[in-house]
Image (cartoon, rainbow, N blue to C red):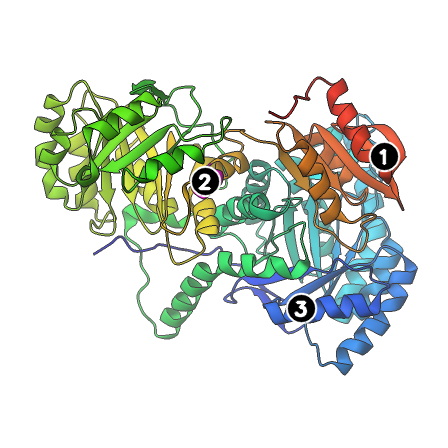
Amino acid sequence: MSTPRFYKRRQTRTVFVGQIGIGGNNPIRVQSMCTSDTKNTAGVINEIQKLVAAGCEIVRLTVPTKADLNNLKNIRAEMQRLKLSVPLVADIHFTPSIAMDVVPFVEKVRINPGNFIDKKLFKVQEYSDEQYEQELARIEERFAPLVLKCKEHGVAMRIGTNHGSLSDRIMNRYGDSPEGMVESALEFLRIAAKNNYHDIILSMKASNTQVMVNAYRLLAERMEAEGMDYPLHLGVTEAGEGEDGRVKSAVGIGTLLNEGLGDTIRVSLTEDADKEIPVAAALVAPFNELIAIQNYRVQQNQNQDIPAHLDFLTTSRFQATPARRETQEFKIGPLPQGGKHPVSVWTRLDDASQFKNFLLAQNADMRFEGIEIAATQYWPEFAEELKAQNFALAVCSANLTELMEATLADKLCWVLKDLAQLEQLPRFLSQIKDKSFELRLDATEINLFEQQNLSVLKNALQNATQALVLSVISAQPAQDYRLLQKALGDQPAHHIHLLFKESALPVLLSASAELGSLLLAGLGDSIQINSSRLSFKEKLSLSYGVLQACRVRISKTEFIACPSCGRTLFDLQEVTAKIKKRTDHLKGVKIAIMGCIVNGPGEMADADFGYVGTGTGKISLYVGKDCVTRNIPEANALDELIALIKNHGQWVERV
């Protein structure tokens, strides 16, 4: 019997957006945002139809001007004619007056506490406690009328904090931090609660997955301390497009879903809005299945008790992401492992004939460090060829005799399907003092949650003198590696090899969500993605993409690109593609591509360079959060961006 999946969702109140319940016992909802100008009725309706057909449950529109506001009645009339009943959300920045006027036309209003009243001027000012309280009183005076109007009309609200648009007041007291993000939302939330209005959902979005995950964890902790139970909307903002955008979104959202946080999600891609829905639906699918099972058990009065020694698996971890777990440094053949070395990437070869094609697929700047082969596919001449290419070689088998015959292996990997075999471990280790060793537990065969099994494992390993590598074959690695680490305690000699074996979900999303959640927790010295669905090149790209999305290992250019919306001042998809084509060889350089100034200047703080739409056909360029060139004609902007990168010494010619 394999280890079961343990899941405990954070309990929240139910908030209705139209007829769609969010939180409580409802499934995790999927939503998106139209990219069309809200004044373009036909464009918006066309997008809504595509989104609904794809499975979108809530649709958001940007409403930046009175003209956009005035066109909502036309959009509503056309939706009614076409019998489109999906609830609408109005996205408001900078204009409290429009927020007030939009309430009768929508089911939810989204406000950003960083710019609902304040404008971001990047001013440095020390606030006394008295001055800070005066600022809060000013906010209450402007915000309370919107709260009361939403309450009167039965309209929900999202208080959506963005890492890139914190107010100067928050920045000066709390800094550009998860603490600042959380406090920014709580200030507004307390005003709403004071007016007995509770139809509220909260979000903590950032393009940096570490910041995003930390902010949501801290928000949940702070709300619990203040007796609040509002639902959470999850998202990684400015995630980008293609594989990178999907990986980054899955890392951030998947980590929190695994911890029981999240009641509705949006995957923000720099693509057509309907492309977001299949990604979001795949991410929430396994959790909605667990929620349905739990709801059924409650209805049937079935016992849902979880073994006491596994309580930690069902408790969300609200603390900040820890530093990488410390392990001693050692070598596997030519590959340094652990210590301060980067998390290494391994792959599996099923037969020697694949090796030549594999080498042809390698990129000089980004390649696997380790290769694993099965003992049944082992040939000495093949091993010699691998070693000549400077790869670390692991031979893997469930049979100890087969492993002992793999004389050219740098690492021996023993697959355990029965913990009774551990009695052989001390004798085996005494015979391989000159080799590295990986103990791989097959959690599809061994029931890891049994405390007795974990005790057997710990006793077998406690006297080992070698630097051991541990890994788990599991359908839910995010859970089982945490379980393994907790059971063994903090033993620096044990290195962790994060192994992903394909599941029923798309490999890219499930590998990103499962492995990403562990890497963000500081766990893992190496990773390996095994999937018959992916080529060597695809496994390579995904492995390094997950590491980069977690900010664990940087191996390529990072593009912080926002999803288009009605505020966007240029074709984001087209421009992003052009910028990537010219700059995607700049390893470690972070380039932000922003359609407008709502989040642009703030997100520049997490990017090296920024390309921001500031008017029709006009672009401003940033270095960090500082605007260095304003209102360049769009036709010249890419060349000037490249010149800016060169002037700052971060340009290299493409090889």
Give the residues drawn in magenta, as a range.
537-543
Real-space CA distance between mark 1 and mark 3, rounded to the nearest whole angstrom: 35 Å
Q: Amino acid at mark 1?
A: Asn
Q: Which residue is mark 3?
A: 50
The mark that comes first in sequence, 1 or 3, is 3
Q: Which residue is mark 1?
A: 636
Mark 1 lies on a secondary structure that is: helix
What residue sits 14% from the left and 43% below the top?
419
Disc 1 or disc 3, which is closer to the eye? 1
In the image, taking residue 552 as reference, residue 421 lies left or right, namely left
Disc number at residue 537? 2
Magenta segment, prevailing SS (helix, strand or loop): helix
What residue sits 49% from the left and 49% below the top?
254
Q: Amino acid at mark 2?
A: Lys
Q: Nearer the viewer, residue 508 or 449?
A: 508
Mark 3 lies on a secondary structure that is: helix
Above or below — where is 392 with respect to 41? above
In the image, taking residue 650 as reference, residue 73 lies left or right, namely right
The mark that comes first in sequence, 1 or 2, is 2
Q: Residues within 10 Å of mark 2 (few under 14, many from 20)?
A: some
